[in-house]
């Protein structure tokens, strides 16, 4: 009886061991299931589609050796950019190439190309470069529309943060209609806020929607530490589509003029007003023809405040930035209504904007 029990236990142990081995072999041979979600598939597709359009921008500048006094080039900074068209135009941020002596564009295939500055708009933090690369190596991005964006929409950023080329981050549109500071005491308006990670080196790279279309140019972050904390900003593509063709055609923004020299904005605090004070008018230009008056000497010999522009076509003008933003929406030859103050009294005049 004991012998039978012994063989029974031996048989059971052998069977369990064989079963465990078979199960282990089955687990080893089996392939893991595919867990990719529709969103992950979309992210990978957009990256594969758009990443060949993203470039690495390096900036070198001249410095003088303090001992030998010789000039030589040194790396000044790096950032991102993207192919705009098949003619080799590349869009990036102005601050990426500011004061550059030499600019090099690196395509995704690792080929390097010297770049020429075509035009820049410091007040919009945009610049256009050009490389003489063959058309087959250039894949322009497709511009979308930023006016149709809404908070919560998925966005993707591709760039070269900290020199790590072709890095992808994802997020959503966090807010719309933001304003950020630019050069010359100007502001960039209608900026897109996103929580997609944007770090130093991402500047100038594209912000994309889930269809792979360009919706913005990554340009700035808000961060006490200097690294991403989930608050990044992108210049909207509707602004980019308006500015880039002007930079390609003229090398700068072309806006009409009133024909005035404006006083510094600090005068508003000194004289307690809101608007743009006219320092002087240019002979023969629209402001003078319309009767606007600049600073003048009073009866006692002291300088007196002239006219203060407070509105154009019903849009309030509080400072020089407001005035420039209004003029950017106009063209030479447009007739505008100008509201102004003279000695505290409100007046209005009409004038035809002149070419710069």
Image: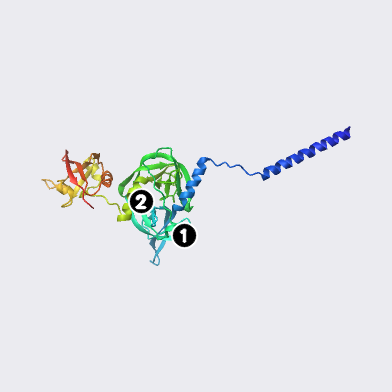
Mark 1 to mark 2: distance in Å?
24 Å
Q: Secondary structure at mark 1?
A: loop
Q: Which residue is mark 2?
A: 126
The x, y position of residue 118, in whole percent, is 34, 57
Q: Is residue 158 visible?
A: yes
Q: Name the outermost residue toward the top.
A: 1
Residue drawn at (44%, 58%) of the image = 136
Tell me the quarter of the picture where residue 236 sits: top left
Q: Which color scheme does this rendered protein use?
A: rainbow
The x, y position of residue 218, in whole percent, is 41, 47
Q: Earlier in the sequence, mark 1 or mark 2?
A: 1
Q: Secondary structure at mark 2?
A: strand
Mark 1 near mark 2, Cβ–Cβ under 8 Å? no
The x, y position of residue 258, in whole percent, is 21, 48
Q: Is residue 48 left or right of residue 242?
A: right
Q: Residues within 10 Å of mark 2 (few under 14, many from 20)?
A: many
Residue drawn at (48%, 51%) of the image = 166
115 w.r.t. 147: above or below: below
Marks 1 and 2: which is nearer the front? Answer: 1
Q: Name the outermost residue toward the left.
A: 299
Judging depth in this view, the residue of 122 and 114 nearest the camera is: 114
Q: Residues within 10 Å of mark 1 (few under 14, many from 20)?
A: few
Q: Which residue is mark 1?
A: 111
The x, y position of residue 285, in whole percent, is 17, 51
Q: Is residue 8 left or right of residue 83?
A: right
Quarter of the image with the N terminus is: top right
Q: Is residue 121 visible?
A: no
Residue drawn at (35%, 48%) of the image = 241
262 w.r.t. 131: above or below: above
């Amino acid at each position: 009886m004991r012998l039978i029990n012994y063989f029974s236990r031996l048989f059971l142990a052998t069977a369990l061991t064989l079963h465990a081995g078979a199960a282990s072999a089955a687990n080893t041979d089996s392939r893991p299931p595919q867990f990719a979600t529709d969103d992950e598939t979309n992210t990978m597709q957009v990256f594969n589609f758009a990443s060949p359009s993203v470039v690495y921008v390096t900036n070198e500048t001249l410095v003088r050796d303090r001992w030998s006094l010789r000039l030589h080039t040194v790396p000044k900074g790096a950032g991102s950019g993207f192919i705009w068209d098949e003619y080799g135009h590349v869009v990036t941020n102005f601050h990426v190439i500011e004061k550059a002596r030499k600019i090099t564009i690196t395509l995704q295939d690792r080929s390097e190309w010297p770049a020429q500055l075509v035009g820049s708009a410091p007040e919009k933090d945009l610049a256009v470069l050009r490389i003489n690369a063959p058309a087959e190596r250039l894949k322009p991005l497709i511009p979308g529309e930023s006016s149709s964006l809404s908070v919560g929409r998925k966005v993707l950023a591709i760039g070269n943060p900290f020199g790590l080329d072709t890095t992808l981050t994802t997020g959503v549109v966090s807010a719309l209609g933001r304003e950020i500071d630019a050069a010359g005491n100007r502001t960039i308006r209608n900026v897109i806020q996103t929580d997609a990670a944007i770090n130093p080196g991402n500047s100038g790279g594209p912000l994309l929607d889930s269809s792979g279309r360009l919706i913005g140019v990554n340009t700035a972050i808000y961060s006490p530490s200097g690294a991403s904390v989930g608050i990044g900003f992108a210049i909207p593509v509707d602004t980019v589509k308006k500015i880039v063709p002007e930079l390609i055609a003229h090398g700068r923004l072309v806006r009409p003029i009133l024909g005035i020299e404006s006083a510094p904005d600090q005068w508003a605090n000194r004289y307690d007003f809101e608007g743009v004070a006219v320092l002087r008018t240019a002979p023969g230009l629209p402001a003078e023809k319309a009767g606007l008056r600049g600073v003048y000497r009073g009866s006692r010999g002291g300088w007196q405040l002239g006219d203060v522009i407070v509105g154009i076509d019903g849009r309030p003008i509080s400072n020089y930035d407001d005035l420039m933003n209004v003029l950017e929406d106009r063209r030479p030859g447009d007739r505008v209504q100008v509201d102004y103050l003279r000695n505290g009294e409100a007046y209005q005049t009409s004038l035809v904007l002149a070419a710069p």
